[in-house]
Image (cartoon, rainbow, N blue to C red):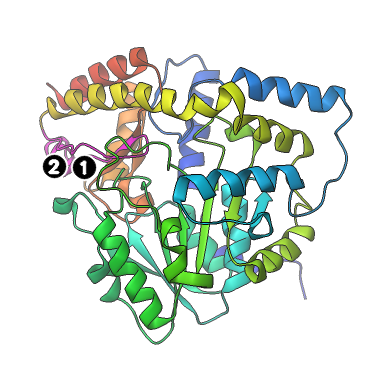
Amino acid sequence: MSRRLSRRLSAIAPSPTLAIKAEAERLRASGVDVVDFGPGEPDLPSPEAVKRAGIEAIENDFTHYTVAAGIPELRQAIAAHYSGRAGVPVDAREVIVGAGGKSVLFLVMLALLDPGDEVVIPAPYWVSFPEQVRLAGARPVPAALDPGDGFTIRAELLERVLTPATRMLLLNSPANPSGAVLPPGEARKIVELAVERDLWVVSDETYESFVYEQEGAASLLAHRPELGDRLVFVSAFSKSWAMTGWRIGYAIAAPEVISAVVTLQSHDTTHASSVSQKAALAALSGSAASEPARTREIYRRRRDRLVAGLRAIPGVSCPVPRGAFYVFPDVRELARRRGFATTKELCEALIREQAVATVPGEAFGVPGHIRLSYACSTEAIDEGLARLRAFAGA
């Protein structure tokens, strides 16, 4: 038999958002001035206390293996943080620290899913959700959300696509790419649905620090008492503390689930970087603890600036996102005016003609929209808007 790549690769595609980032970097390297609305990455630096803790870890030779689940003091700090934040008790034994939220999510998929299982994913969705489900041998089932409702997750829309094969609800709030947040009433209905159908609920709340109107936003972690061991809560330090490159994420779940994920991690990355774990510990205490609140107000101002600018462009309809740091405007009319059949074609023309990088809605399961990140400077937002107006002929 001749050598070949694994068949599983035929079921997935490279990350579209990382592909956009690579194209933007290629253009920059050739001397093009790119306005990059593409990456989901804070432009702000990691907090000074975090950087100092990482440097001290290196200087103190904390550069060897740790236990697979994460250093005990970090797991304890995460447990204490959420016990206070969510108002429900979390024990350190119910926490695993991994090499980024993406890695933790993938290990959770491997731990909980079997071939033939179905996973309901609200659409629009983060680009890696369906691919991770497929890599675990299961089948992603999109649940289309209503753009007129701000792409809000509704229990009734999830229930419509449930089948006897459904094993998991894979949710994200605040949502990438839409910025929608989960309303408390819907959270309760989802809890009831999950209990009734005995489903796993995996709640990715990586953008939890960036909710701009706290009223009307729910975290499923607060529903642990009702969901019991069905809930797996996932988050990361990447967005809240601008620590994307440090690669530190974590999950909170029942000890049995955590043990399974730790076993998988022990054969994969072994553990998160020892240096990064010390840096993450510093993020949860002292001066760095207030960094997410400070960052949220910066993003709020940028959000308002970008939304106002987009609403002034003919052919663009842009709702105000309530969370995360993305806008997800409807650009179907702009595409029609410019003669593009798809938003993928529109985004390709936009970077080619105006050197503005965006991500087409096709990547998130919802054509007709594009995602723009406002985790960039005010100057970049203003320049990007000027180029978008030129692109639209405004």
Dominant SS of magenta comes to: loop
Q: Where is residue 317 in the image (x, y as percent from the top left)?
A: 14, 38
Element carrying mark 2: helix
Q: What stretch is highlighted in magenta?
A: 315-340
Residue at disc 1, secondary structure: loop
- Dot 2 crowding, Cα within 10 Å, few <14, some 14–19, many 20+: some
The answer to if 328 sits in the magenta stretch is yes
Asked if labels 2 and 1 touch by Cβ distance under 8 angstroms, the answer is yes
- Does residue 130 appear to the left or right of 64 in the view shown? left
Tell me, yes or no, whether the highlighted magenta stretch contains residue 161.
no
Task: Give percent across and percent down for residue 157.
Answer: 24, 68
Percent across and percent down for residue 324 are 37, 39
User: How far is disc 1 from disc 2 in space, using C-alphas?
Assistant: 6 Å
Q: Position of residue 319 (x, y in %)?
A: 18, 39
Q: Dot 2 corresponds to which residue?
A: 336
Residue 330 visible, this angle:
yes
Q: In the rendered view, would you say 332 is above or below 108?
A: above
Observer-nearest residue: 119 or 95? Answer: 95
Quadrant where the N terminus lies? bottom right
Query: Amino acid under label 1?
Result: Phe
Left or right: 230 in relation to 345 = right
Comparing 6 with 259, the one in front is: 259
The residue positioned 67% from the left and 54% from the top of the image is 92
Res 12 visible = no
- The reply, left or right, for residue 242 in relation to residue 5 is left
In the rendered structure, which amino acid carries the disc numbered 2?
Answer: Arg
The residue labelled by disc 1 is 340
Residue 26 drawn above or below residue 40: above
In the image, farthest residue toward the bottom: 164
